[in-house]
């Protein structure tokens, strides 16, 4: 059972990396249905958040709200700091998806939670989502500050390298963008750099959009 839960968790994250939101949501749901109190609370909460994000990306806001409610209930019942952190982060994702300006304060709270937990994965997850929101909102200075939280890991961690790449592309300095792209490519392995980040064209600041 535990191996099956872990396999579905991994499959959900792989589907997310490949841009298959529906499959990511389904795999996360399969993991959560098989999970029990014997499974790590952080990983369960992270998978709940994965499902919320995937459903938002798939455009199923009603199911995303149900998943967010389930995550909030889980976090309240579990009572652990990691569970509360991922509940706050998922709430920010939902607000960002709807263009709600409260996403900014919710992401700030999630970053504060991550700082207290002092777990690199949690900090990266919060910094990535917050930076994406700030880029979409046109706040490039804020996005740079969020990305700076993981700058020290970008030379060896692919996810952190992508955070840097996203922000450098939005800023528009071609030399910095090319440097960030080279670092991400060196760490990518068999993973494909998201086309939106590998494209040299720099987008204009946009209205708030779904954080990813």
Image: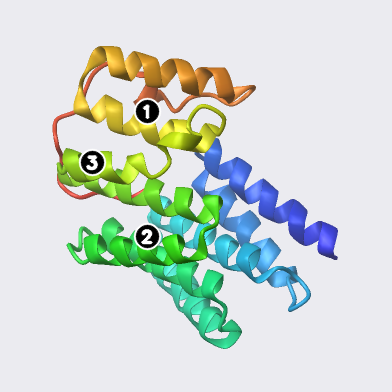
Q: Secondary structure at mark 3?
A: helix
Relative to 101, say whether 182 is above or below: above
**Marks 1 and 2 in Cβ contact (< 8 Å):** no
In this view of the protein, which residue sits in the foreground, 22 or 95?
95
**Marks 2 and 3 in Cβ contact (< 8 Å):** no
Relative to 84, say whether 203 is above or below: above
Residue at the spot 73% in from the left edge and 71% down from the top edge:
35
Q: Mark 3: give few (<14), some (14-19) or many (20+) Cα within 10 Å.
A: many
Precedes in sequence: disc 3 or disc 1: 3
Q: Which residue is mark 1?
A: 165
| Quadrant (top left/top right/bottom left/bottom right) for the N terminus | bottom right
Let me know if residue 149 appears in the view.
yes
Residue at the spot 45% in from the left edge and 61% down from the top edge:
114
Let me know if residue 212 appears in the view.
no
Q: Which residue is mark 2?
A: 111
Whole-percent x and y of residue 183? Answer: 48, 20
Residue 195 as seen in the image, left or right of residue 21:
left
Question: Residue 2 shows which numbered tag?
Answer: none
Whole-percent x and y of residue 46? Answer: 56, 61
CA separation in Å, label 3 and label 1: 12 Å
């Amino acid at each position: 059972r535990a191996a099956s839960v872990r396999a579905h968790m991994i499959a959900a994250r792989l589907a997310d990396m490949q841009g298959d939101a529906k499959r990511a949501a389904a795999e996360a749901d399969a993991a959560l249905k098989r999970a029990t109190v014997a499974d790590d609370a952080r990983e369960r909460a992270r998978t709940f958040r994965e499902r919320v994000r995937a459903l938002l990306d798939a455009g199923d806001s009603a199911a995303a709200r149900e998943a967010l409610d389930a995550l909030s209930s889980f976090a309240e019942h579990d009572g652990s700091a990691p569970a509360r952190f991922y509940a706050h982060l998922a709430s920010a994702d939902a607000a960002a998806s709807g263009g709600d300006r409260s996403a900014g304060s919710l992401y700030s709270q999630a970053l504060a939670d991550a700082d207290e937990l002092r777990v690199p994965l949690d900090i990266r997850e919060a910094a990535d989502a917050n930076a994406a929101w700030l880029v979409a909102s046109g706040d490039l200075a804020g996005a740079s500050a969020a990305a700076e939280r993981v700058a020290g890991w970008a030379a060896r961690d692919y996810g952190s390298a992508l955070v840097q790449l996203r922000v450098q592309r939005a800023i528009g300095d071609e030399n910095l963008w090319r440097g960030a792209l080279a670092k991400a490519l060196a760490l990518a392995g068999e993973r494909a750099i998201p086309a939106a980040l590998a494209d040299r064209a720099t987008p204009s600041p946009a209205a708030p959009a779904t954080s990813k």
